[in-house]
Amino acid sequence: MAFAEDTREKWQHWLGIILAELQDALVYRHLFREVREIVLANGTLADTPSVYWAAWFDTYVHYGASALRRQLKNSDESVSLARLLRQIADQPTLLSREWYLRDHPGGTEAWFVAQAHCAFDKFAGSGGQHVDSALVSVDRDALLAAGKDVESYVDRVVAHRDKRPPSVIPTLTDMDKALDVTFDLASKYHLLLERRGYGFPVAAWVGDEWRDLFKVPWISGQADGVRGGT
């Protein structure tokens, strides 16, 4: 019993770390998109050539791609979604229907109990008494498939320079899709491990106050072309 409880607590802890990192990635993607729209809406700004645009773009792409890669790693020292799903698939009996219903945050009223059974069916199949390894493996395969091109790109270009170029250069759309799949799966397993749904309304969480930064001149008190310094 102690082993089962300790393992579930470990998985819950890992999932908290995973979701926090994915939330950061979603926030940074939201800010990247919003700033891009600000730039495109300002013709003068958009038409002003600068090496800064390449640095800004590469910084976001490398961060976002690396954040995804972390969730795909399977080493024994990794805290990742891929490794979490692998461990759940290897030890499915630790997540039983009886455990899921015990002390469920929804309560013991018939309607809540019925909803809890329906939620657990997503992981165990209809009436299954514990999580079905095959269903978890399907989710893990979907995770790895969604991120494989991004992972290869980071491994061979971002983390270090490999003599073998990546076979595919993922686009922003590819990275966005992989991030969405990864976050959706992490949210799904929050329903299993924490027995409640998980949502993250990015735009509402970020708000609009961050825009105030762009209403303030960034360079002041200097003649054109003159940099500050000593």
Image (cartoon, helix red, strand yellow):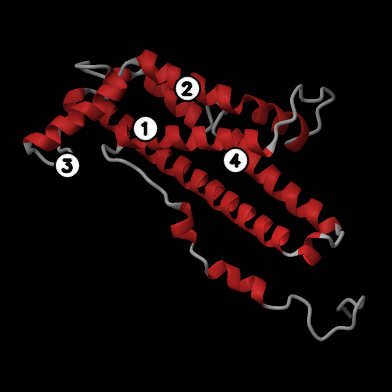
Q: Residue at x 62, y 52 (%)?
A: 33
Image coordinates for residue 170, horizontal then vertical, percent:
70, 31
Amino acid type at mark 1: Tyr
Q: Residue at x 41, y 38 (%)?
A: 15
Q: Residue at x 25, y 26 (%)?
A: 120
Does the CB distance between marks 1 and 4 fall below 8 Å? no
In space, the residues marked 2 and 4 are separated at their CA atoms by 17 Å
Q: Which mark is residue 67?
A: 4
Considering the image in quadrants, where does the N terminus appear? top left
Image coordinates for residue 98, horizontal then vertical, percent:
16, 25
Q: Which residue is mark 1?
A: 189
Front in this rendered view, residue 155 or 27? 27
Front in this rendered view, residue 43 or 204? 43
Q: Secondary structure at mark 4?
A: helix
Q: Relative to 6, is 142 on the left or the right?
A: right
Q: Which residue is mark 2?
A: 140
In space, the residues marked 3 and 1 are separated at their CA atoms by 17 Å
In space, the residues marked 2 and 1 are separated at their CA atoms by 11 Å
Q: Which residue is mark 3?
A: 106
Q: Residues within 10 Å of mark 1 (few under 14, many from 20)?
A: many
Q: Secondary structure at mark 1?
A: helix
Q: Residues within 10 Å of mark 4 (few under 14, many from 20)?
A: some
Does the CB distance between marks 2 and 1 fall below 8 Å? no
Q: Relative to 65, is 3 on the left or the right?
A: left
Image coordinates for residue 150, horizontal then vertical, percent:
66, 31
In space, the residues marked 1 and 4 are separated at their CA atoms by 19 Å
Q: Secondary structure at mark 2?
A: helix
Front in this rendered view, residue 71 or 64? 64
Would residue 87 be seen by someone viewing this image from the given angle?
yes
